[in-house]
Image (spheres, grey):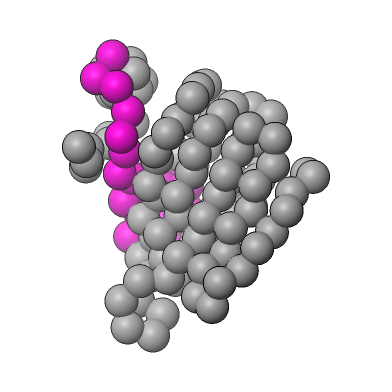
Amino acid sequence: MNSTPTTDMDMITEQSAGLKILLEPFGNEGDGVTISLEGMLTIEHVTEIYQKTEMAMTQFARVNIQLSAVEEIDLSVIQLFFYLQILADEAGNHLNIQHHLPQGLTDLIDKSGLDFTTQTP
């Protein structure tokens, strides 16, 4: 990965070609973290997304994944979200996925069986 990490006190941002990942803790000391994903959520970036999310789940009991400004999402990332939900359940963590995706894309993801429980406007 050819990324340019930047930090701002409690926030970490990494950006590589086509993908931006932002990790931002929320709540009181260590309550949880929000991982914002933007850009190309494709097989080329699935390892980066997995590594950041898995790291967050080892440090926080509550992890929110926020999808916004998604240009593309493919089956590999949808499968990764399934796997991350299994890991969270096994570890007793809470994993929530929020999104700003067009309804057509949301419908396709819902047909895959992945529960996007929260859609934000």
Q: Is residue 93 visible?
A: no
Residue 98 at x, y percent in the picture:
30, 44
Left or right of 66? Residue 121 is left
Quick check: 96 above or below 81? below
Q: Nearer the viewer, residue 109 or 70?
A: 70
Q: Residue 81 at x, y = what percent?
A: 45, 39
Q: State left or right for residue 27 relative to residue 35.
A: left
Compared to residue 118, the image places residue 94 above or below, namely below
Q: Please identify the quarter of the rendering in which residue 5 is found.
A: bottom right
Which segment did they paint magenta? 84-104
**Towards the viewer: 35 or 15:** 15
Lateral position of residue 9 relative to residue 43, left or right: left
- Residue 32 percent across, percent down from the top left: 38, 70
Residue at left 61%, top 69%? Answer: 7
Residue at horizontal 78 percent and vertical 44 percent from the top = 1
- Point out residue 96 in the picture as x, y percentages from the top left corner: 31, 51
Q: Any magenta on residue 102?
A: yes
Give the left or right position of residue 3, taking residue 63 as reference.
right
